[in-house]
Image: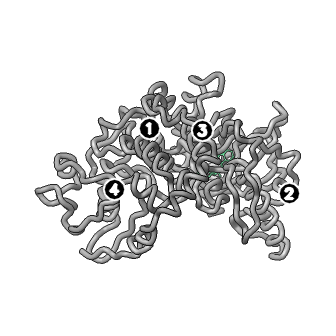
Amino acid sequence: SYRKGGYHAVRVGDPFAGGRYIVQKKLGWGQFSTVWLAYDTQSSKYVALKVQKSAAQFVQAALHEIEVLSVIADGDLSNSRCVVRLIDHFKHVGPNGQHLCMVLEFLGDSLLHLIKYNRYKGLELNKVREICRCILIGLDYLHREVGIIHTDLKPENILLSNTIDPAKDPVRCETSPILERPEGNPSTGITMSIIEKKLKKRARRAAAKISGKRSSTGGATTKPDRRLDGIDVQCKIVDLGNACWADKPFAEEIQTRQYRAPEVILQSGYSFSVDVWSFACTAFELATGDMMFAPKGGRGFSEDEDHLALMMELLGKIPKKIAIGGARSKDLFDKYGDLKRIRRLKFWPLAKMLMDKYKFSEADAREFSEFLVPLLDFVPENRPTAKQCLEHPWLSMRRSSVQNETANEMCNKSNIRKVETGIRNLQIRVG
Ligand code: ADP
Ligand code: MG
C-alpha cells in the first residue's frame, strides 16, 4: 500500500507542517491511514498524527472527517464530552501524492486491547459502569448537539485517556516504530520478539491495574490494585471517518458486522438508535469478554440470517411488523414473520445467559440485563436515547468487588447446568 495513492512512508524523526510536529513512533493504522505519535514543538505536547492515504477517495473521506471533527471541537470548548479532539490539520506532499493529515489529541489503548489484556474474561462491573458512562456522554453529545450518527461504535473505536507519558516510557516509544511498520523492516527477529514480549508484559500489567481483575498467567496472580478503585476510567470515542449527519445518511450498509443493528440488516432505514444498539453490544463485551453476537454463515443460510437468529434467541422474536417491513425482508422472512431458512430457535434470555455462561450472580445478571435489554429493542424508536441511558440507575450502582466475588463463587457452586453452554456453542444450524 506504500505506492501512488496509498500510505505515505513516515519515518521516526520526520518533520511535518514545516517542522512543527516531529514523528516519534507508530501508534496504529487503519484502512485509510497510518497514525503516529508526534511531538508538537509549539505546545510542547505529544499528539497523534493521522496521515491519510493520498488517492482521491481517501482525500474525500479525510475532508469529511475533518469537517465532522471541527464541528465536534467547536461545540466542546472544555474538551470534556468524551470524543477525540482535533487540534490541527494540513496537507503533506510526499512521493505517493498529497496526504491530508489530522492532528488529534494523543490517547491510549483501545477497549479492545483492554479486553485482550484481561484475557477475554470481562472487566469488573464497576469499571464497566465507568466506561459505559463515558461512552454515553460522548454519544449523547454527538447525537443531540452535533446531530451526527457515529455508525461504527465498537471497542476498537473507544480509546482510553492517556496516563502514560511517552517521554518516561522509553521501551514503548523508542522501539515500537520498528516493530509496527507494516512493510516489514531489516531489524532482526530476535530483537523483535524480546521487545514484543516486554511490551506485552507491561501492557498486561497496566491493563490488570485498570481493570482491577486478577490476570492469571499460569498460576501467578496479580492482586487488583485497590488504589485505582476510586479512579474514573476515562475514555473517548474516536474514528469519525464513517460518521454521518442524521439528516443525510449516505451509506446503506453501516456498522461493523457484530455491532450492526437489525434495521440495518433489514434495510428499513436507520437513525441515532443504531449507535445505542452498538453501545449495548460493546457493554456486553466489556462485561463478559465475548462478543454479544458473532454470526457465521453456514450450509443453507447466510451470515445475516444467523445474525438475526442469534438476536432472537437472546432477545425474543422480532415483531412481525418489523421483520417484514424492510427492503430485504422478503429474502429473509416468510409472510408470518419467521426466518425462512432457520426454523428452530433456542431461546436463551440475557439474564439467564449471564448466570449460566458467565457466572454472574443473580442480582448482577438481573440488573445488567434490565439496563441492556431495552437498548436492544427491535423497534428502533423504542430504544432509549443516550441521554435516557445516562439516567439509568445501573450506571450509578456500586457493589464492592469482594461482594461480587463471593456471590460469583456461591453461584458457581450451585450451578450444575454450566455444561449446557459448550454444547450449545458446538451446535450446527441446518437449513
Ligand atoms: P482509520 O480511519 O484509517 O481506520 P483510525 O482513526 O481508526 O484510522 O486510527 C487507526 C488506529 O490508530 C486506531 O485503531 C488507534 O490504534 C490509533 N489511533 C487513532 N487515533 C488515535 C489517537 N488520537 N491517539 C492514539 N492512537 C490513535
Ligand atoms: Mg478505524
From the viewer's perspective, is the residue at label 1 or at label 2 nearer? 2
In the structure shown, which secondary structural element does the residue marked by tag 1 occupy?
strand
Circle 2 sits on which residue? 171
The CA distance from mark 2 to mark 4 is: 44 Å
Q: Earlier in the sequence, mark 3 or mark 2?
A: 3
| In this picture, residue 246 sits left or right of residue 89 | left
Q: Is residue 63 visible?
A: no
| In this picture, residue 258 sits left or right of residue 227 | left
Badge 3 crowding class, 10 Å Cα cut-off, few under 14, some 14 to 19, many 20 or more, is: some
The CA distance from mark 1 to mark 4 is: 22 Å
In the structure shown, which secondary structural element does the residue marked by tag 3 occupy?
helix
Query: Where residue 98 appears, x then y in whole percent?
Result: 64, 48
Residue under the image location 39 percent in, 53 percent down: 350
Circle 3 sits on which residue? 130
Q: Where, quadrant-wise, is the C terminus in this rendering? A: bottom left
The CA distance from mark 4 to mark 3 is: 26 Å
Q: Earlier in the sequence, mark 1 or mark 3?
A: 3
In the structure shown, which secondary structural element does the residue marked by tag 2 occupy?
helix
Residue 343 higher or lower than 292, as above or below: below
From the viewer's perspective, is the residue at label 1 or at label 3 nearer? 3
Residue 177 higher or lower than 426, as above or below: above
What's under tag 1, amino acid-wise? Answer: Ile
Circle 4 sits on which residue? 311
Are the residues tagged 3 and 2 within 8 Å (C-beta)?
no
Circle 1 sits on which residue? 149
